[in-house]
Image (tube, coloured by chain):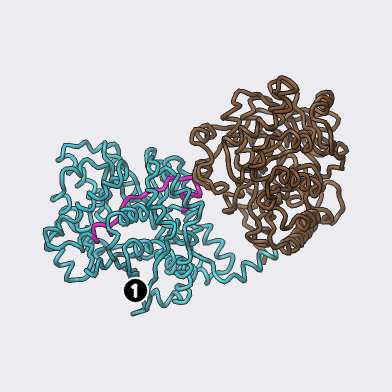
Chain colours: A brown, B cyan
Amino acid sequence: MARTDIARRVYNHTWKLDPIVRSLLDTDFYKLLMLQMIWGVYPKVDATFHVINRAKHIRLADEIDIGALREQLDHARTLRFSKKEMIWLAGNTFYGRKQIFMPEFLAWLEDFQLPEYEISVRDGQFELEFHGPWTHTTMWEIPALAIINELRSRVALREYGPFALDVLYARAKAKMWEKTERLRKLPNIKLSDFGTRRRHSFLWQRWCVEALKEGIGDNFTGTSNVLLAMDTDLEAVGTNAHELPMVLAALAESDQELIQAPYKVLEDWQRYYGGNLLIVLPDAFGTASFLKHAPGWLAEWTGFRPDSAPPIEGGERIIRWWQEHGKDPREKMLIFSDGLDVDTIEETYRHFEGRVRMAFGWGTNLTNDFEGCAPVPTSRLHAISLVCKVSEANGRPAVKLSDNPAKATGDEREIERYIRVFGQEARLEKPVKV
Amino acid sequence: MARTDIARRVYNHTWKLDPIVRSLLDTDFYKLLMLQMIWGVYPKVDATFHVINRAKHIRLADEIDIGALREQLDHARTLRFSKKEMIWLAGNTFYGRKQIFMPEFLAWLEDFQLPEYEISVRDGQFELEFHGPWTHTTMWEIPALAIINELRSRVALREYGPFALDVLYARAKAKMWEKTERLRKLPNIKLSDFGTRRRHSFLWQRWCVEALKEGIGDNFTGTSNVLLAMDTDLEAVGTNAHELPMVLAALAESDQELIQAPYKVLEDWQRYYGGNLLIVLPDAFGTASFLKHAPGWLAEWTGFRPDSAPPIEGGERIIRWWQEHGKDPREKMLIFSDGLDVDTIEETYRHFEGRVRMAFGWGTNLTNDFEGCAPVPTSRLHAISLVCKVSEANGRPAVKLSDNPAKATGDEREIERYIRVFGQEARLEKPVKV
């Protein structure tokens, strides 16, 4: 006998909006860490963020209805941190430290609201921009990306009947579980979820996170998603991102200040955080240049996150740098987080095993891998390389070079100037898949 | 087309236990307030609690399988306060006050586990007792009652087919919503949920609490259930209970100490709590006697909770006492909590409106009223008067007289002695329904 909960069914079929983002904690932990520092040190800086679809051949604005996108963005702007969320932020231990967020910062956060957005369509792409104080625009990055990605999934899913949907998720779950079984064979792996921004959907991310928790146990060390961390008693993980050196570089008054900008921001960081939060992200303007000019005190930091160089080559370069500074790499940490999947995780793990501490931040291929799962083949479930980058700070253009020229963002002439200042040693073009 | 989530269905049909109590916060808030004081002032006192079914004609041990009861009690003993729960207890505001729980107390609570239990069957009733330190046995009251009551509901529900179950809950929801509509007509009512111990089930209590929240809005001022308060951003409410004067009375060395015991415990209370937590529960050994010997400083307290006298008569007596002590009752509060339903709430509200501040703690008839809802009539869904009372403190018998002799508990000879000491002015027998 088949029964239906009539009230629930009617509710499900009559609601006005199924919000994609339902909590301001549904964001990456590093946004909160960076926000506290921006609030403390750069409260007057304006920063513009904008969303960039690197997969130009995907005409997002043709796939996704702009009205539906506006509704989701508007809904996110109605959110505030709830009482329970504020209590948890104040009381939880992050990276082994209590009260990582200062009471004054939390008091300010209590009234936080996502700022306004500007949206238009050009050449089949959304031009989605956030203007205003850095303390506010920075917080759009993750919800904006998660909203666009999930809206795109929903469009694709509308094509399927109920059995096809059932099979799609059945295959995706089986695929995810196979990955889990392979990871279980790496006995000392430390792996966490970095997949919020690119996820297929919130519920799918939660499924993957809980599957990993059951599948590899304590080797699953946390999630960058603060809401999931709270709800599942996992550690919230993450440190800092490119927007910090990018804004500081944009604000530099001379080439000399420009070349110092990536270190200045790490000095700020060090005043706010310690221990395992002292992770260097070296590739904003090329890792080779960063290491060449890096001050000695950076060798005291816990580790590096080589984010756009090939993992083995990038890791080896950093190990050499530690050795040149008289450090034992076995006491240091490398965090890998760029376009990982089980193959690259296994290869990197086996290459560096015993030589350095490692952690893997697994993103898109954890939370949005439906390759080969659709009963009727479609390209619309392939994750795309969508990012939300700072493009201006106090009216000046912001630039990222990256170790991979395909990941560079910013005004062309400024990019040329940055290359002149930082050089382009060891930068290597490779296709950006995710 | 009817679809079934096969994995979920198999999971639902193969699990070993459907736990009734899944969190140590699934208890009444007053237990935590009392526990902190017991931990602070009476850490060495032993107290025995035992479960009493006042409805002797219901042979509970014939209805409920003792093995199933053991499984549920054993499961409750596996629980610990989770990290998120500890953070919330430390960080939440209760009755407008931050850090109502001291850090030392919370550190102690982190390792808390429900102590062992003893169970046997006599005359168709369970003899369920908890022996040991008061700091531990006190915490069994609510989970033990909730477990027995829900196990009894489950037995009754097993008789029904799926449509009958659907109709049962449909009627119960409609009935509950009618009550909500009547309460909405009392514009200044302050009402909260006191129904954890007697609930039909945890899920039904949650439904009722959320229905009231939607139905009467801000006039619904909270729930005594700490877990529901946390999960639904409601206020946790409750103050203290009879076990405090009962234990202090049992420990009294003389009749003179005995008559002072109810005031001594309130002196302790006052050292721990203030404001709206200063509520007197006057009826443990008869309200008339309590008021006759009450020290003047009690007139400074916020209010009284007359718990076993008829509400209007009991309230009037306390109003007279405030007037005799030169207090304006309009600045004082009466909390009504004994066997309320919408009729008595309306009557009491209208009687006292404008003369005193009022709050209603609605219990059994909120969370366990299935009268007239069962498609096949049964008495097994009627709530029964099941209590868990302290029966001994440091080996001496504990007694409660109450304003209603039908609610008296304890050794017969001790009851006689207490009546000799406290008198029995204005005690009035009325049937105990819930």
Going 39% across and 58% down the picture, which residue do you hit?
Answer: B364
Q: Percent x, y for residue A59?
A: 85, 37
**Above/below status of A433 relative to A414:** below
Q: Is residue B266 visible?
A: yes
When asked about the image quadrant of residue A198, the answer is: top right
**Quadrant including the C terminus of chain B:** bottom left
Q: Percent x, y for residue A373?
A: 82, 56
Going 59% across and 26% down the picture, which residue do you hit?
Answer: A43
Q: Nearer the viewer, residue B79 or B44?
A: B44
Question: What segment is highlighted magenta in the picture?
Answer: B227-247
Neighbours of disc 1 within 10 Å: few (<14), some (14-19), many (20+): few
Going 24% across and 67% down the picture, which residue do you hit?
Answer: B394
**Quadrant including the N terminus of chain B:** bottom right
Q: Percent x, y for residue B112?
A: 42, 60
Q: Is residue A71 visible?
A: no
Q: Is residue A331 left or right of residue B283?
A: right
When asked about the image quadrant of residue A348, the answer is: bottom right
The type of residue carrying mark 1 is: His
Q: Is residue B203 left or right of residue A138?
A: left
Q: Is residue A171 magenta?
A: no
Q: Nearer the viewer, residue B12 or A111?
A: A111
Total marks shown come to 1
Name the residue carrying label 1: B57
Q: Is residue A187 left or right of residue B111?
A: right
The chain letter under disc 1 is B
Secondary structure under tag 1 reads loop
Q: Percent x, y for residue A184?
A: 71, 63
Q: Nearer the viewer, residue A265 or A149?
A: A265
